[in-house]
Amino acid sequence: QLLVSVRRIQYRQAWEKVVAQQAEDDVFEAKVVAVNRGGAICLVEGLRAFLPGSHLTGQLPTEDLIGQTLPLKFLEVNQEDNKLVVSNRRAVVEQQMSDLSRGDIIGGVVKALKPYGAFVEVGGMSGLLHISQISYDRIEDLEKVLQPGQQVKCMIIDHDKVNGRIALSTKTLEPEPGDMLTDSAKVFELAEETAKKYHERMEAERKAREEATKDIVIGLGDSLADLTSDDSEGDDPLADVSDNLDSLLS
């Protein structure tokens, strides 16, 4: 009876810890203790948590997974239904996203082609290479430019760290407009060099815009000063009106 009571207390405390961990939404580690056709089973605070196969990064739920310690995040915590679901992919994506910045050059593999662009797998993440961001030249047939399974290099032009989404570009890596259509291997080979030139050009344009804005502000200031000066030198246009009102009221 005493043993049963102790186990119940430990079970309740384990769920309390898990609920607190979910509220913090931090990445944690857990060991895989079993696998099945749908995924894997991990031990979290002594509780069995289900890791769906679709939420594994770079691995399949095979026997080789047993004994491995994986970074995880919670997908679902439901004590009433005794349901605990975790994700390895979400944890990996969050860790990778924290190291990524706009303008970074990353390597990836083309996973799928769509009418609007290509999806590129980068680590455990899927990035969109929109058709408008592939080349400065117009693309008539995307399959002639990219193929599933092809290794590519892209520049990150935007990212959503909360949802693990990234927007990619290869046209910013073209040494000359249209190179992605004629010699993509050259684009990827010179990616870092071209990206450096691109960033330098963007910085020069930013400084030019700042100088132009500064000139406009200075010009407006001078114009306002001239207006103030003109008003102070002339007669008050409302003086006569004020005098007339004073005479009427007196």
Image (cartoon, rainbow, N blue to C red):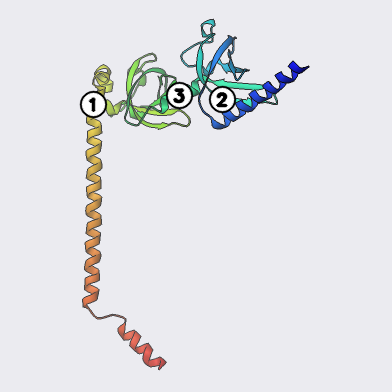
Q: Residue shown at 33%/24% (left/top)?
A: 140
Separation of disc 1 and disc 2 at Cα?
40 Å
Q: Nearer the viewer, residue 119 or 49?
A: 49
Residue flagged by tag 3: what amino acid is it?
A: Val
* Residue 208 horizontal side relative to residue 169, left or right: left
Q: Residues within 10 Å of mark 3 (few under 14, many from 20)?
A: many
Residue on which the image places disc 3: 93
Separation of disc 3 and disc 2 at Cα?
13 Å
Residue 138 at what x, y percent from top left?
30, 28
Q: Quadrant of the N terminus?
A: top right
Q: Earlier in the sequence, mark 1 or mark 2?
A: 2
Q: Earlier in the sequence, mark 1 or mark 3?
A: 3
Residue 176 at what x, y percent from top left?
22, 26
Residue flagged by tag 1: what amino acid is it?
A: Thr
Residue extending furthest right? 1
Q: In the displayed structure, would residue 66 be above or below residue 217?
A: above
User: Which circle marks residue 74 in the picture?
Assistant: 2
Q: Are marks 1 and 2 in contact (CB under 8 Å)?
A: no
Q: Residues within 10 Å of mark 2 (few under 14, many from 20)?
A: many
